[in-house]
Image (tube, helix red, strand yellow):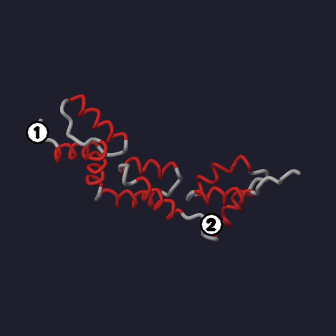
Amino acid sequence: MAFAAPSLKGRALRLLSQREHSRAELERKLKKYEEVPGTLAMALDELAAKDFISETRVVQSVLHQRAPRMGALRVRQELQQKGIAPEAIAAAVAGLQDSELARARALWLRRFEEPPVDAKARAKQTRFLLARGFSGAVVGKVFKGNVDDD
């Protein structure tokens, strides 16, 4: 007994049931299944009209999941990859700037329980924070607040 392949709308709903996706993400993931040009855009328009696709929810989801462990630079990059509008990205990242130092310090304390004892340890801890999207200025402030003058 053969099963019919899921429709584009069905595939989109399955993806949306797992997590929030932006329209651009859905287009990228479902493009290979589009047999008749224009049907994917129609299906996504219909889902957007019913509020199944929401850029605002995608932004909130990323902020909720990533902000505690990532810096503003990394969150910005992830939102750009998801195809979020530049204005929405700017607004989301602006909200993160206020808590950037506190989030970096909390992450640093969870990962490294003590200040760096030498240049090698300091470099390792700096790389850790930079890789998570915290700016060099924020990283410097984390060490100034936690390390006696070297």
- SS under mark 2: helix
Q: Is residue 112 above or below residue 88?
A: above
Q: Nearer the viewer, residue 140 or 85?
A: 140
- SS under mark 1: loop
Task: Compute the Cα span from label 2 to label 1.
Answer: 55 Å
16 with respect to 140 (left or right) = right
43 with respect to 149 (left or right) = right
Amino acid carrying label 1: it is Asp
Residue 88 percent across, percent down from the top left: 45, 61
Amino acid carrying label 2: it is Ala
User: Would you call the spot at circle 2 few (<14 residues within 10 Å), some (14-19), or many (20 or more)?
Assistant: some
Q: Mark 2 points at which residue?
A: 48
Q: Is residue 46 above or below residue 63?
A: below
Q: In this view, does 120 lie above or below 113?
A: above
Q: Mark 1 points at which residue?
A: 149
User: Would you call the spot at circle 1 few (<14 residues within 10 Å), some (14-19), or many (20 or more)?
Assistant: few
Furthest residue toward left: 149
Furthest residue toward top: 120
Q: Nearer the viewer, residue 46 or 114?
A: 114
Residue 27 percent across, percent down from the top left: 64, 53
